[in-house]
Image: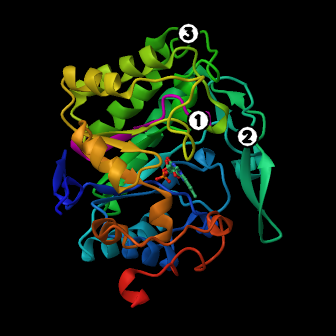
Amino acid sequence: MSSPLFTPFQAGALRLANRVVMAPLTRNRAPGGLPNDLMVEYYRQRASAGLIITEGTAITPQGQGYADVPGLYSTEQLDGWRKVTRAVHEAGGRIVTQLWHVGRVSHVDLQPHHALPLAPSAIRAHTKTVLIRDGVPTFVETSPPRALDLEEIPGIVRDYAHAARFAIDAGFDGVEIHGANGYLVDQFLKTGSNQRHDDYGGPIPNRARFALEVVRAVADAVGADRTGIRLSPVTPANDVQDAHPQPLFEYLVRHLAPLGLAYIHVIEGATGGARVLEDRPFDYDALRTAWRSHGGTGAWMVNNGYDRALAEQALAQGADLVAFGRPFIANPDLVERLRRGGPFNTPERATFYGGGAHGYTDYPALADAG
Ligand code: FNR
């Protein structure tokens, strides 16, 4: 039976062949921060997704928080990404990159000159990052951060715009601003990580200021219709929380709505965990209504724990696109497998972060399975 999941969709300037999106997935296979041939193969294999969102990609060396993640601030990196985007386009796909500044979720060993990671406030995240020690991926506690000076903030906003321009030069169809999962944008948004007393802290409009400045700068640089943002209103990922997430995120999407963005991407619940959190209730329908009623015309993309049935239900209830994470790790031809109702390969956790081709480019497609 035909399903709306496999119908085309226009998200801003992005013409997508179907509604199945590959969620951003950090895989720590870019030594030196450089996209390489193995990554070209990995993304090429997944080009039947309506849209690929790359793994989080550091906008600056300071924005880096994990070993062997790629960046988008040097011409060498740009040249590496050009091979990825060319391969995906030749295979008929669309691809945007996820612009990532980790803020406090980093370690001095990953920072230039072993400096302290940057954050809205000097509040340490009780979470872990990955370093490679003696060739082995090792989880370590993040370092205590330093609070950004007010005068430093405009430069960081410019860094996002610069990386966005690089992304378009590298052949990406657009960019996704990583505003989720407790990284820099989310750290500014939420009370648990932002205790500033200047224009970027305190009341909701102040905490939302950084996110809105970043989005406007990126949209000015590459076009709002090629810009999306990922949000996670209540995820506990990377030790973030907000006292009142519903009014915070409704304020944010109301102010994003008139900008003409390609899409809003919302992680429902705890990233990779429960979709409904008893201690952190959230009304996602109200969030979408706030966006639409204030002129939001781009796509509404949802994520977290989706399968085909749940995805079809979301589309019936007003979502436009559904992002799948772990299923895409293990199923390069996920779209075809969803279409047929399976079977699905099982993702192997041990090879999620770091390593080589095993658990990365060697999951079979249906045709390979015979
Ligand atoms: C992730 N996730 C993630 N999210 C993000 O915004 N940027 C990233 O770089 C990553 N990296 C990442 C790596 C790995 C190995 C996993 C498993 C997850 C979160 C991911 O995009 C998604 O939100 C969750 O996996 C939930 O979706 P699924 O897997 O239930 O479809």
* Image spot of residue 18 (x, y percent): 22, 59
- Residue in front for this viewpoint, 212 or 240: 240
Judged from this view, the residue extending furthest toward the front is 1
Disc 2, SS: loop
Neighbourhood count class around disc 3 (C-alpha, 10 Å): few under 14, some 14–19, many 20 upward: some
* Whether label 3 touches label 2, CB < 8 Å: no
Residue designated by label 3: 202
User: In the image, is residue 238 part of the stretch drawn in magenta?
Assistant: no
Amino acid type, mark 3: Gly
Among the two numbered marks 1 and 3 on one chain, the one whose residue lies closer to the N terminus:
1
Frontmost of labels 1 and 3 is 1
Q: CA distance from mark 2 to mark 1?
A: 10 Å
* Whether label 2 touches label 1, CB < 8 Å: yes
Disc 3, SS: loop
Q: Residue at x 51, y 22 (%)?
A: 281
Mark drawn on residue 72: none
Q: CA distance from mark 3 to mark 2?
A: 24 Å
Residue designated by label 2: 127
- Report if the beta carbon of the residue with label 2 is closer than 8 angstroms to ligand 1: no
Q: Which residues are magenta?
A: 222-236
- Residue in front for this viewpoint, 189 or 278: 278
Mark drawn on residue 182: 1
